[in-house]
Amino acid sequence: MSDWLLALHSSTDTLGIAVVSAQAPLSAAQVVCRPMGRALTNALPSVLDEILPASEWPGIRRLAVATGPGGFTGTRLTVVLARTLAQQLQCPLDGVSSFALMAPRLQLTLPAPQRGEPFSIIQDLPRRGRVAGRYQVRDGWNQDNATCADLDFRELQHPALLQAADQPAPALTMAVDVACDVLQLLRCCVDRHASDALGPWDSVLPIYPTSPVGSV
């Protein structure tokens, strides 16, 4: 049985799963993205089993999950599954916001003089306001040789509802790319596994700013 590192992302209607052997480079990762919609509710374990058979789950050495903001049901389902696996397998779990995962690639769209400086990512929610997080990415960040260390990028403010008067700048519009973002999530998992970082499963909760979740 191999040792595995696993990342799960379902903050949108598309499920993203990325897995790599703990002994292999990130370039060897298997990344699968599958539009699921409401089918995710019943199909999540079986889809994971297709990609990483359940017989291999005891070999999972670390997990990572996107915690949102995003669709409440999809995000919650993967967080619950990740927490359950981490608890049962007694392995670390990393929770990373979906905004933090997209921050490094979105930062590349900023004008060159603003790269490396703090910026916000904003999502407009119809009839529910705006959600924003604040980020800083190392100037010159390149995903081909990047890591997830604090020196590469930081989440300065977790995603939360903005007050009507708040106008953060510079600001970029949220844009999920599940294939890129779940690979970035796996990169975080690989880096934290290499550094033997703590990853308590019970502190990982879904982020859904318009409907706070206090427990799973």
Image (tube, helix red, strand yellow):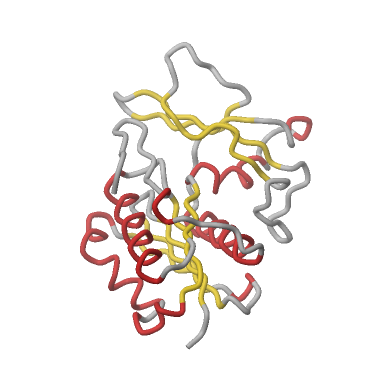
85 and 90: which one is in front? 90
Q: Image check: 140 left or right of 64?
A: right
x then y, percent, for residue 31: 50, 69
Q: Is residue 47 above or below residue 173?
A: below
Q: Image check: 88 left or right of 132?
A: left
69 and 108: which one is in front? 69
47 and 35: which one is in front? 47
x then y, percent, for residue 18: 49, 67
Q: Image check: 140 left or right of 3?
A: right
Image point 63% across, 78% down: which residue? 24
Image point 77% across, 41% down: which residue? 139
Image point 42% across, 49% down: which residue? 204
Picture quadrant of residue 156: top right
Q: How many marks?
A: 0
Q: Is residue 214 above or below residue 52?
A: above
x then y, percent, for residue 76: 31, 50
x then y, percent, for residue 111: 72, 32
Q: Residue furthest top?
A: 165
Image point 23% across, 60% down: which residue? 39
